[in-house]
């Protein structure tokens, strides 16, 4: 069984109502709604970091003339 860490958080009244309404509509606990939201934020951040890294390394590859898999293989054999 998974363990849980209890935390106390503060939310503005409108956001708290929204979260409680979501929980009710989805048949979830408030805790589950908050967990889902945090997972989504984490996933979004990781995706953004990946896109940034991909852009960086794509730029570096293009600077070296690496545009295809064959170009990469030739570069790595040097």
Image: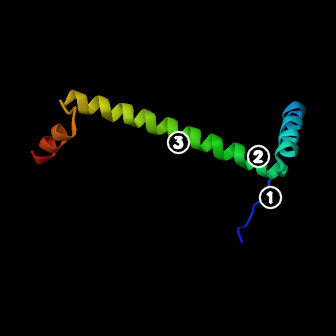
- Label 2 with label 3: CB-CB less than 8 Å: no
Distance from disc 1 to disc 2, alpha carbons, whole Å, reads 12 Å
Crowd tier of the residue under label 1, counting other residues whose Cα lies within 10 Å: few below 14, some 14–19, many 20 or above = few
Q: Nearer the viewer, residue 7 or 20?
A: 20
The residue that disc 1 covers is 6
Placement of the N terminus among the 4 image quadrants: bottom right
- Report whether 68 appears left or right of 52: left
Distance from disc 3 to disc 1, alpha carbons, whole Å, reads 25 Å
Where residue 2 appears, as percent x and y from the top left, is: 70, 68
As drawn, 41 above or below 14: below
Count the marks. 3
Task: Write down the quadrant of residue 11 in the picture.
Answer: top right
Where residue 29 appears, as percent x and y from the top left, is: 84, 52
- Report whether 19 appears left or right of 4: right
Distance from disc 2 to disc 3, alpha carbons, whole Å, reads 18 Å
Where residue 62 appears, as percent x and y from the top left, is: 24, 28
């Amino acid at each position: 069984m998974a363990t849980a860490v209890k935390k106390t958080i503060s939310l503005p009244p409108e956001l708290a109502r929204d979260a409680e309404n979501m929980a009710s509509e989805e048949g979830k606990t408030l805790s589950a709604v908050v967990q889902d939201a945090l997972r989504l934020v984490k996933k979004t951040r990781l995706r953004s970091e990946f896109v940034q890294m991909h852009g960086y390394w794509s730029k570096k590859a293009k600077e070296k003339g690496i545009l295809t898999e064959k170009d990469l293989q030739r570069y790595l054999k040097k």
